[in-house]
Image (cartoon, helix red, strand yellow):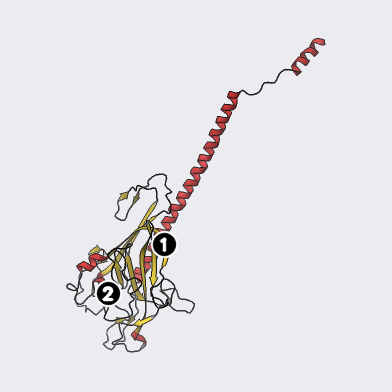
Amino acid sequence: MSLSRRTTTHAAYRPQHGRSLMELMVALVIGFIILGSVMLMTTGSNFSGMRSSTQSRMDEDAQMVLAILGPQVRMAGYSAVFNDRTDGVAYKRFMGPAVRGCDNGFANAQAAAWRGDTVQRHSDVLTCAAGGDGPAISVLYEADTLNTVPNAAGDPTDCLGQSVRQVPSSLQSQAPTAAAAFVTAVENRYFLRKNGTVSDLLCAGNGDNASDPFAGPQILIPNIESLQVLYGVSNTVVPGKSATGINQYNTQVVGYLTAAQIDQQFTAATDPDNDRWMRVVNVKLCVTIRSEKQEAGEPTAYVNCAGQVITPADKFLRRTAQATFALRNRSGIF
C-alpha cells in the first residue's frame, strides 16, 4: 500500500515539459508558408480578375467604336428618291459626296458647315489639317425620325441629340413644290482628340446649337491608341451615266486609299465634272484600344491594324478590332 502511494505521489508531481524553441520556429515557418501561399493565391486571383475585366472592357470599347461609325458610314448619302421633277428624271433631295475624310483631322471642324450650297459641295467645305490628333471622317445624309433618334418634339437629330435644320435641296432649281426645295440634312463629324498618350473619339453634329452648329463636341469613347481609316474607291464611270445622275461610278473597289491619297490622285484635272469623294464605295476601319493603366505583369504582345504582332516596351494591354462598311447610298453629284 505504501509503495503504491509513493508511486502515485511521485507521478503527480512529475515536472511538465513544453515545446522547444526549435519546434516553435518550425511551426512559425510552416504557418508563414501557408499564409503566404493563401495571400499569393488571393492576389493572383484578384490580378487575373482585374486583367480579365480590363480586357473585356477594351473589347467592348473597340466594338463600340465600330458600332458607332459603321451605321453612320452605311447611312452616308441616304435620301428618299424624288421622281416628280420637271425633267422627268429620278433624283434625290440630297445628292453628292456624303463622306469626307482627313488623315490628320479637320482644320475647320468646328467652323465650317454645309448649308445646302449647290455650288460648293460637302466635301469642299472641310479642309484637312497638316498635322493633328488623328483621322477624322464626316458623313452627311437626309435625316428623318427613323434613321435618327427623334427628340421630345419629334424632330430628327444629329449624333449629339440636337434638332437638325433644313437646308436648300439639290432639287431647288427644278423642284415642283416648295417643300421639295429643302432637305433635312444631318452631318456628323467624328474625330480624335489627344488626351495624354492616347486619344478620345468625339462627335460634333450640325444640329441647332447656338450660332455655331459644330460647337461643343462630346467624347464618345476614351483610351484610343490609334484609328485607321481607309477608303475603298472605284475609278471608272458607268457607261451612259450622266455626271448629274445617280451612281455614275460603278461599285467595284479597285483599291484602298487614305484621305490624302484620294485628294492627291483624283484632282480637278482628272475629275472635271465629278467629285473625287464620289468614288468612295466602302470604308475600312481599324481601332486599337489601350488599357487605362499598366495592368500587365510584363509587356504583352498584340496584333496591330497592319496584322503585325507587336510587343510593346510598356505594360499596357491593347485590343484591336476592324471591319469594312459599304456605303449603301451611292448617289450623283449636284
Left or right, residue 40 beside residue 88: right
Left or right, residue 239 beside residue 135: left
- Residue occupying the far left of the picture: 269
Tell me the crowding category of disc 2: few under 14, some 14 to 19, or many 20 or more residues within 10 angstroms, Cα based.
Answer: few
What is the C-alpha distance between the residues marked 1 and 2? 28 Å
Q: Residue at position x 76%, y 18% from top?
A: 12
Nearer to the camera, 321 or 160: 160
In the image, residue 103 above or below residue 268: above
Q: Earlier in the sequence, mark 1 or mark 2?
A: 2
Provide the residue designation for mark 2: 124
Tell me the crowding category of disc 1: few under 14, some 14 to 19, or many 20 or more residues within 10 angstroms, Cα based.
Answer: some
Are the two marked residues, 1 and 2, in contact with CB atoms closer than 8 angstroms?
no
Q: Residue at position x 27%, y 74% from top?
A: 124
Q: Position of residue 288 (x, y in %)?
A: 36, 56
Q: Position of residue 61 (x, y in %)?
A: 42, 59
Provide the residue designation for mark 1: 221
Q: Residue at position x 20%, y 67% from top?
A: 265
Q: Is residue 18 visible?
A: yes
Q: Count how many numbered circles sit on residues in the image.
A: 2
In the image, residue 165 above or below residue 202: below
The kind of residue tagged 2 is Asp
Q: Position of residue 146 (x, y in %)?
A: 42, 75
Place residue 139 in its image quadrant. Answer: bottom left
Q: Is residue 253 visible?
A: no
Q: Which mark is residue 241?
A: none
Could you tell me which quadrant the C terminus lies in? Answer: bottom left
The kind of residue tagged 1 is Ile
Place residue 277 in its image quadrant. Answer: bottom left
Q: Residue at position x 47%, y 46% from top?
A: 48
Tell me the element at label 2: helix
Could you tell me which quadrant the N terminus lies in? Answer: top right
Tell me the element at label 1: strand
